[in-house]
Image (tube, helix red, strand yellow):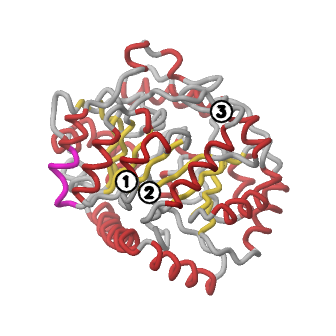
Amino acid sequence: MALSFFMSWNRLKIIFRLICSHPLYVCHLLMKKVSFARRYQWVERNPDQDGCVPLPLVYKLMLTFKCNLKCKVCMLWGEKGWCKDIPAATASEDLDWDIVKNLIEEHTKQRPSFILTGGEPLLYQRFPDLAALLKRKRLFATICTNGLLIEKHQKAIEDNHYLIWLLSLDGNQEINDRLRGGGVYERVVKNIHLLKSFRKSPYVGVQFTIQPENVSIMYDFCKDMVRLGVDWVLLNPRWFVSDEQAAAYKVEMRAFFSMNSRTQEGYQFPVDIDQKEFVRQLNKIRDEKWPIQISSYLQEPEDIYPYMNAPAKPIRNRLCYKQWLRFDVLPSGEVTPCIQFPDLILGSLKKSDLATIWNSSAYENFRKKIRKAPLSVCSKCNNLYLYDAKRASL
């Protein structure tokens, strides 16, 4: 979870409110911070042990490619989405339930956390069973969802405070529905109200993807979300890859891994965000004392300039610590070092176990490559922010 508080006194008030509202989640965050710090130290102290890495602290499971929306900017199913080219049987595949169950049951002692994504994770056929298992094992999972199917799963998710929700909204009703489809805003807002009506109200965040159409309403959107009663707003700049980055990535994948890449095409489009307006909006947000957490992958408003104008250069952190922290699984059961660009496959959980894949020679070689330099498409990746060892908080 990304924390970027703008006022020190206000930060204390938000933390106190969080402790009162979600005490178990706060304990989880504190334990996670300690375990992450230890792993960062391990990575720094053991540069020659990339094939003997301790077990992952986070598992990101792409439960399915299927989605009930086709947002035009989606890297999977959007105008340039790479899922359009995969076979129909693969596109409709769900992650094998035995794989999911084994990951959770066999590694409970390590107290990992989970990120559940898709496609749309709530289309996963075994989602009720997954929610129940996480609750029984007392393991937290962040669900990255478009928010349309929450009511359908009310029985499975009600009073389950181990489920952390991150719903996507990209503006007020007019702008959001222009970007995501008619009627989407109203349905998502209805489901936010539903989540907050539970006896044990879960932690609810909203991800706002900043685009040319909505950059001018960032502040107003945060105000709207406070009125809705959400706990967190994540301001996420729209991810894009320049033509030069895409070309360099294709060369790298052939040179280092002897394979052809295609997933970069899902991010390869022009983006023309009004940079001055972005700075104005984010400064306006920073000047406000908010009762909830407002955060952004860009730590400073002026970061938008290198983000947009020097796309191949990481803004701060250049080492992807995620490769020593998180284990990414595709709906096929295949393991990829990066679920955002899953061209490279390092193993399959249908054929091998987690520990063997995690410290395989293929994974070790990939880590050695990342230690030297990130891939050309890595400069915008939110993992450089989420798993940055220099961040003050989780």
Looking at the rendered structure, the kind of residue marked 1 is Ala
Looking at the rendered structure, the kind of residue marked 2 is Ile
Q: Which mark is residue 73?
A: 3
As drawn, 276 above or below 21? above
Badge 2 vs badge 1, beta-carbon distance below 8 Å: yes
- From the top left corner, tell me how far across and down residue 16 is, in percent: 51, 82
Badge 1 vs badge 3, beta-carbon distance below 8 Å: no
- Disc 3 and disc 2: Cα gap in Å? 25 Å
Q: Which residue shows up at 62% across the image and 35% down it?
A: 241
Camera-nearest residue between 280 and 137: 137
- Read off the residue under disc 2: 164
Element at label 1? strand
Which of pointers 3 and 2 lies earlier in the amino acid sequence?
Answer: 3
Q: Residues within 10 Å of mark 2 (few under 14, many from 20)?
A: many
Q: How many marks?
A: 3
- Read off the residue under disc 1: 141
Magenta run includes residue 108: yes
Q: Which residues are magenta?
A: 103-110
| In this rendering, position of residue 351 left or right of residue 40 | left
Camera-nearest residue between 69 and 202: 202
| In this rendering, position of residue 241 left or right of residue 103 | right
| In this rendering, position of residue 275 left or right of residue 264 | right
